[in-house]
Amino acid sequence: MTTLHEMLRIIVKKKCYNAHMEGNKKRFKGMTLVEVLISLALLSVLMLLVLFTSTWLFTFVKNRLIALPNHVIGLSRAYSAVYLNAQDIQLSATYTVDKNLPLVTLYKKSGQNLVPNTVDFKKLIGAETLSTATGATVTLDVQTASVSIQQPSDNRFLLLLYLSIPSSDGRRFDNTVVIKKLVNAAPVPEKFTVTSNTAGKKVTIDLYYPALGFGVRPIGSSDMQLAPETSTITTIIDVNGVRKTATASLTGTATLNGSNVYQELDIQTSTTTQPDFVMIPPLIGVDGTPCEDVTVKVETRP
Amino acid sequence: MKKGIALLTVLAFVLILSLLMVPLYVSVLGMTSTLRSIQVLPAKHEAFAAGLNVARTLIVNAQSPATSTSIDLAQGTIVVTAYLSRSLESDLSLQEGQEGIDCEETMRLCSAVNYWDVTVTFKDAYTLTGTAVQYVMFQPDKDYVYLLDFKEGRK
């Protein structure tokens, strides 16, 4: 009896369990489908994100890699055009700027003369197709390239040079260089020659750079200004230490950028005594450099 | 036998990969060296400008006919040297109370105009040479130093 009862109890228990499990299984299957759909939707969003990100990344890298040779060419052209000529401008005696073209005419010392040289920045950057070692080509479009030169009104020794060259792949290479003139075209004495004439002894001083004229300081001003006169009174001292006045005049006229410049300073004395010292009056150089007055011993040796 | 084929496959793969990498390496190397040489231009431009400013100070404070200094810039080292090549005597010895002055000892006082040969060397490879003229005043800070006719040369 007990065994039968036990058997029945087990059968009922099993049936109940199976019925319970089947219900659970059905519910489990329904949940999985929704979850799978949501997961798939999330996954697709993620995959789309990955796709767009990776495409953007690959395009970015590809563009940079392709642009690299172009960048090197554009940059080297811009740098060499500007910096090589910036150095010439830095070391020139003087220069003039034509902002419209734009070009800079610089003057460099060659022997006793100042030789002009024109720097045309538009020509320097040149319109041509350049090939790289990797076979890539880039065309620098000089027609739409812009070069501009600015000269601050309060500083004549400073130039600001802006250069912008577009290339065929749509990139633009910009370069700005601040050029500060380093050389002073100061009309300092270079060589002394003493000659005699009917008036007396004459000391001729060759100037290293030509002078625009004599310099004068108006009363109350520290700035030296160009004197319109071409002669002034200067002092000579003879071997006995006697001070006398003499007339100084600028000679050896040449033309520089439409202005008269002078390459020699003559000091005419009225005595036949050899001058031992002369006072060189203040002079102004071709770039506006003021040169102070100085008393020096006359050195006739080269 | 299979191992040998696998090894050969790996070796061939490595070889092909290296052949692909060589032109890439060469072109990147070429571009890098070009960019480096381009970088020298602005660095030299700034170093020479700085060197000439240093030359002014060096000349004004010179105690002997030959003077030199070295400065470490971010762009590289610059060495500035100045040699006195010529001097125009001042009229100091004619002035009252200065008759017995020894010009050998007081180089600065006896000179009115000094001509200096200046050299600026950048990175021990680029040189800028020229002449500087000093108008000697009573105080060094009142001196005028004019930089004349500089040219670049390469060592």
Image (spheres, coloured by chain):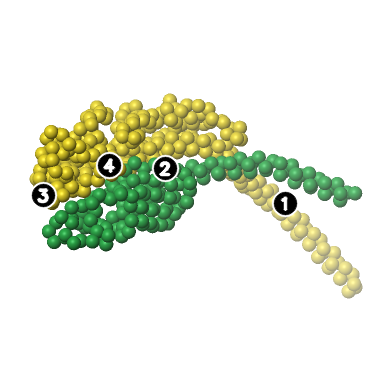
Q: Position of residue B3 (x, y in %)?
A: 86, 51
Give the foreground label among 2 and 3: 3
Q: Position of residue B18 (x, y in %)?
A: 71, 44
Q: Are marks 4 and 1 on the same chain?
A: yes
Which disc number belongs to residue A225? Answer: none
Q: Secondary structure at mark 3?
A: loop
Going by the image, does B24 lie left or right of A109?
right
Give the foreground label among 4 and 2: 4
User: Chain A appears in which tint?
Assistant: yellow
Q: Chain of mark 1?
A: A
Give the foreground label among 3 and 1: 3
| CA separation in Å, label 4 and label 3 | 25 Å
3 or 1: tag closer to the N-terminus: 1
Which residue position holds label 3? A242
4 or 1: tag closer to the N-terminus: 1
Examine the rendered structure and indicate whether residue A57 appears above or below residue B59: above
Q: Amino acid at mark 1?
A: Lys
Which residue position holds label 4? A190
Which residue position holds label 2? B152
Q: Secondary structure at mark 2?
A: strand
Q: Secondary structure at mark 4?
A: strand
Identify by letter the chain in green. B
Which disc number belongs to residue A29? Answer: 1
Residue at 35% of width from left, 52% of height from top?
B83
- Circle 4 crowding by C-alpha within 10 Å: few under 14, some 14–19, many from 20: some
Q: Chain of mark 4?
A: A
Give the foreground label among 4 and 3: 3
Q: Position of residue B97 (x, y in %)?
A: 13, 61
Q: Are marks 4 and 3 on the same chain?
A: yes
Q: Do the CB atoms of the residues marked 1 and 2 lie less than 8 Å apart?
A: no
